[in-house]
Image: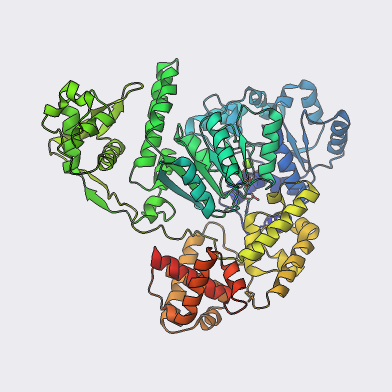
Amino acid sequence: MLNTLKKVFGFQSFRPNQESIIKNILDKKDVFAVMPTGGGKSLCYQLPAKIMNGTTVVISPLISLMKDQVDAAIENGISAAFLNSSLSPQEMSGIYHKLKSNNLELLYIAPERFAMPSFLETLKTIPISLFAIDEAHCISEWGHDFRPDYLSLSGLTQTFPHIPVTAFTATATPRVQEDIISKIGLRSPYVIRASFNRPNLFYQVKSKIEIESQILEFLKEHKDEPGIIYRTTRDSVFRLAEFLVDHGISALPYHAGLTAEERKRNQEAFSRDKVTIIVATIAFGMGIDKSNVRFVIHADLPKNIEGYYQETGRAGRDGEPANCLLFFGRQDIPKIRYFIDQMPNENEQSIAMEKLNQTVKYASHNVCRRRQLLEYFGENYPKENCETCDICTGNVEKVDITTDAQILMSAISRTGQYFGIRHIIDIVAGADTKRIRELQHNEIKTYGAGKHKEKKHWQFIINELLAQDAIVQDGGQYPVLILTKKGTDILYGKERIDGLKREEIKKKPKAFRVSGFEPYDEILFDRLRVLRKRLAEEHRVPPYIIFSDMTLHEMCIYYPATLTDMKSISGVGDTKLERYGTDFTEEIKAHLEENPDISIPDRKPVTIPANTSPQKVKEGTIEKTYELFNKGLSIKEIAKTRNLATSTITGHLENLIRDGRDIEIDRLVDPAKRNTIEELFLTLKTWNTGPVVEHSKGAVSYDEAKLVRAYVQQKTS
Ligand code: ADP
Ligand code: MG
């Protein structure tokens, strides 16, 4: 198994659960697996397809997805094809011919084909090694994406009693899981429910104020990174895409109002890195296998957590760090409520309402975002601090807000719990409005009790009270505020309440860093990216199918300039080595020749055994560097002692500096040089080290630039 993993896929180790799933498949057992997006489900059946005798049949719902998957498999040297309505009769018969002569390892099929008796008869005459049902939740009416075509798969195990059947999905509540297993008729399957945690995603919520300029701001900081921006309506998609294009950003829209042709074109442009940003409604979804999506922005409040999780899940499939940013504004709530109020069925309405409340809570609650998401899926997150969400990195400080809460809730209570947010704030702030005079609310005791603080502050307290369930919003389009039991207790002094300190994020979040993420040569990365795009065009596949961002990053750390070195890079299997190896080694060689002072780490990438947390390994190793540095060793000496590359040690020191640890910077870069480098960053207006090194004409090394960058950013944060 490991041999095939390395040779065919070029990976050093299995992702969680892959190994045990494959073992069970090879033992001819049925398997049911729930693994998050990007968890590596395809490999679980593609690897056995390579090992087992006969053809592995994959059932997959989307034609577009099939083609990409087949392209990717072929790039890895697996003989693969698909059968669907897009093929001509000649192409079809070519594939049948290959099937019958046992010349296909992997065959993708759309589910509706299983409703055709003649097709089943043909299948029966073919040596089949395995059935793999992808997106298996589509078979369940209880799931969120039911497809009637999938029902023709029920009874598969009866028609093919001797062939193992496996089902994969990224979303299934326990109820849906049971439904899937019984509908397909899996025979005491090996069941895996993987953790939903996506450690490489950074979750963040920002107040939505001026959405378009806020997005522009974000994009400036994430230049050239592919990303998805979700909006609720077609109109807002259209307008935002236009706005971005007007501001020189490469963006395309995607929504159900476009023709099928346009949608396909725009999706393909995104998938092939021809456009950087896609602005979309949630119609843009399944079928996006692009692995190098670096961020997903929600410009409007999502309707429920399931959807939000799925949409954010499209970021960082390659395992590299990616951002998930939600812009949250209370003004979005009534819009969703309006839709909910239109629902014909009262039960559905109340479910939808509850789901909406959960997203509001997610966005406004002072609790680790990751913990909240995982708890929503019934998973207990063990760590105190996830280190990769705004709450955990934000150095959040809590303050007692009981008195202010009492002022607000007293106003709510004294006006009979009949009024909405704005009016209550007006009362507390002592506003002189027509409505207040008419209702004589200027005569109640709390009128003006909070006039010494700005309205924003009161809005903030209300958000906290809502988030912590002390009050709720109730009633149709003009929701009113109502006290809960908890709220009443606070009002009468039986309980106290804490809130986020309002200037909440005093420190800028720590530079984002997760397992497996090391500084890499950014200039080389750009070069290799261009090369990848060119090859992708030549071979007519999306660029990420050639090599993922993760693979390119690794090349930009270890500079493999020979095929032997290239082979040790994760993601470079035998077929890709043969097909693209030289293109990439040549490019790297050229880069090295042009930049003679680059120091190449002499050590191959470490293989981290599956199931041990890379983060832990890394934390320990950084501490070790810290210890040695404080004993007075230089970078070179530490590298030598530890048998690590100097660039690795520099990376450790960079992280230590960013963490605000006690690092004597003078020992790394002397003060005069530091000033020069700092000024270069400022005048060049970039945090990329490339331009700084280039500009210094060899006086400054990449390592020095990186260390100074970390130092300056930490100092000014
Ligand atoms: P899923 O279908 O579960 O969403 P995919 O099968 O599309 O995920 O895999 C996501 C990405 O992870 C792909 O780019 C794939 O090549 C990569 N991947 C899968 N298994 C491994 C592994 N063992 N090591 C490194 N990368 C892997
Ligand atoms: Mg998949």
Q: Residue at x 66, y 60 (%)?
A: 526
Is any part of residue 340 visible from this angle?
yes
Quarter of the figure with residue 34: top right
- Residue drawn 32% across the image and 53% down it: 396
Q: Quadrant of residue 112?
A: top right
Q: Quadrant of the N terminus?
A: bottom right
**In which quadrant will I find the C terminus?**
bottom left
**Image quadrant of ligand 2?**
top right
**Image position of 471 (left or right of 307):** left
> Residue 264: image x %, image y %?
69, 34
Is residue 363 left or right of 8 when viewed as pictured?
A: left
- Work out whether residue 133 or residue 219 is closer to the camera in this orientation and state it: 219
Horizontal placement of 495 versus 660: left or right?
left
Residue 113 % position (x, y): 74, 26
Q: Image point 78% across, 62% down: which residue? A: 583
Indicate whether 29 appears above or below 529: above
714 to 327, vertically: above or below: below
Viewer-side residue, 519 vs 441: 441
- Answer yes or no: is residue 76 visible: no
Residue found at x 49% / y 60%: 513
Q: How many marks?
A: 0
Taking depth in this image into account, of 582 and 123 the one nearest to the observer is 582
Residue 272, percent from left and from top: 70, 46
**Residue 129: % across, % down:** 74, 40
The residue sitting at the top extreme is 344
Residue in front for this viewpoint, 261 or 563 = 261
* Horizontal arrangement in the rendering, residue 475 relative to residue 71 (left or right): left
